[in-house]
Amino acid sequence: MSDITFPPRAWVTAFIGISLRETLRFVNQRGRFLAALVRPLVWLFIFAAGFRAVLGLSITEPYQTYVLYEVYVTPGLCAMIQLFNGMQSSLSMVYDRETGAMRTLLVSPFPRWFLLGAKLVAGVVVSIIQVYTFLAIAWFWEVRPPALGYLTVLPALILSGLMLGAMGLFLSSAIRQLENFAGVMNFVIFPMFFASTALYPLWRMRESSTLLHDICAVNPFTHAVELVRFALYQQVNWLSLAVVLGCLAGFFGAAVFMYDPAKGLWARRKGVA
Amino acid sequence: MTAALEIDQVNHRFGRFQALKEVSLIVPRGGFTALLGVNGAGKTTLFSLITRLYNNSTGSIRVAGYDLRREPMQALARLGVVFQSRAMDADLTVRQNLAYHASLHGISRQDAAGRIEEVLSQVGLVGKSADRVSALSGGQQRRAEIARALIHRPDILLLDEATVGLDVKSRAEVLELTRRLIAENGVSALWATHIMDEIQPDDDLVILHQGQVLRRGSAADIAGRQGLTQAFLDLTGVAV
């Protein structure tokens, strides 16, 4: 009996393999890339153009001056790309589970936290490619943050992408069938997006409803948006950074728990894998 | 020499339903063991426990001597699995699927490239390596799944109703291929089935019914003079 050990190189190989598969699937689904890009562009070109006329924005951190609505909404749309990408990953996890492809991943000898983490990181890489493509197009639409901002936003995009992807992983562990995804969109994704600072600043929310303001203030997506917004202007929103890190740990921990064969819902289900 | 697979006093419940009751069996090294049972007997649940899709909370499962609960990495690294339903990514090519599986076992790209050629040659799919899995016939998909299960050179192959949904010719080919690969590669196999014709007299046989092992032994001994079908009917009291 030969002894099998897993040196660091083997872990790297597994990580690259999982990432490559996600990339291949992404490349094979060109429509997914276009859809992911068209959604925020429609918001930028049509929605923001319309609101620009009726919605004035006074000076709001991190902006130094009055900004156009398109400029304000762009970080929110970056986070929206990542939110939908996280949900797309979650959807593909449920699809893989329904078709049986998920079992190939789960019977790998590597621990589940590593397998889920690798899948998560691979999804984030894909989302970051989408965000930078969107930012490049937005540049031609007069949305031009400082040049260095394109670099300083990268860590924020990694963290926000990880948090939203981890949330998707967690949701995928709790969803039994693809049909249930419509419910997730209606009860999780849309409320999360609209009850955030992606489209309007918090002070605007308070003018309409204190309760709505409070909901927006505790919404993790708000903090993902603010982290990206500040980073795009070479600043750090420490509160948002702490919330994003905390939510990332919480969502990922919950996902690992739920996918653990000995714990979570996974352990009590029949025919889930 | 340790057995390829040792299952001792394993139970499993889904809520109030007792899916497996005190299941014990041994798959010897280099042997072909058939796990015979009607649909719902508990075969897939047992496979899910062996592959750690479910956790075994009672009893023990040892793969090549490694305890699945205490040494899951060592144990899973020695398992090759062909699931009852399709488990390959239909949108990727055969080669991409095999490379992905190799990476899930930490096999480097260079090593994987050689092994992919080797296993595809063994299952007769060399010419299909660039085809998408969705373009393969049912029998070819099964052969590709067997190639996937072999790529990390496991000690034991688990095949859960590997011929389900195949026509008679493809079924015979997949079974013959599996037996040949076991003989050539020296791996062991646990072959779950509900089809009597797939069992040969010199196979080790385990009869699983309603979550319990009813008989273990050589197929010839269990069949006796009355034949395997009648022996199975007598033991389980069900129509086949």
Image: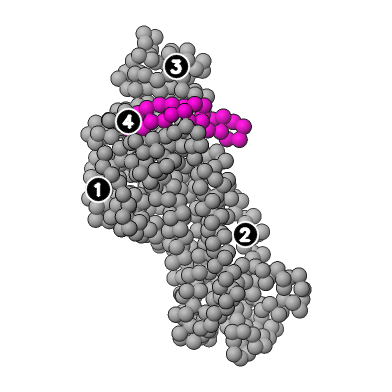
Q: Secondary structure at mark 2?
A: helix
User: Do the residues at discs 4 and 1 belong to one chain?
Assistant: yes
Residue that carries the numbered disc 4 in the rendered image: B3
Range shown magenta: B4-27
Q: Which residue is mark 3?
A: B232
Would residue B194 be visible to someone looking at this image?
Answer: no
Question: Cα distance, mark 2 to mark 3?
Answer: 51 Å
The quarter of the rendered structure image containing the N terminus of chain B is top left
Give how far across and how far down residue A230 sits, in percent.
55, 80
Query: Measured along the vertical axis of the image, is residue B142 above or below residue A29?
Result: above
**Circle 1 residue:** B115
Q: CA distance from mark 4 to mark 2?
A: 50 Å
Q: Disc 3 residue type?
A: Phe
Q: Are marks 1 and 2 on the same chain?
A: no
- Closer to the observer: label 1 or label 2? 1
- The answer to the question of whether label 4 and label 1 lie on touching residues, with beta carbons closer than 8 A, is no
Rendered residue at 36%/38% (across/down): B66
| Callouts 3 and 4 in the same chain | yes
Q: Position of residue A191 (x, y in %)?
A: 66, 64
- Vertical relation: A146 (above or below) B155: below
Q: CA distance from mark 3 to mark 4?
A: 26 Å
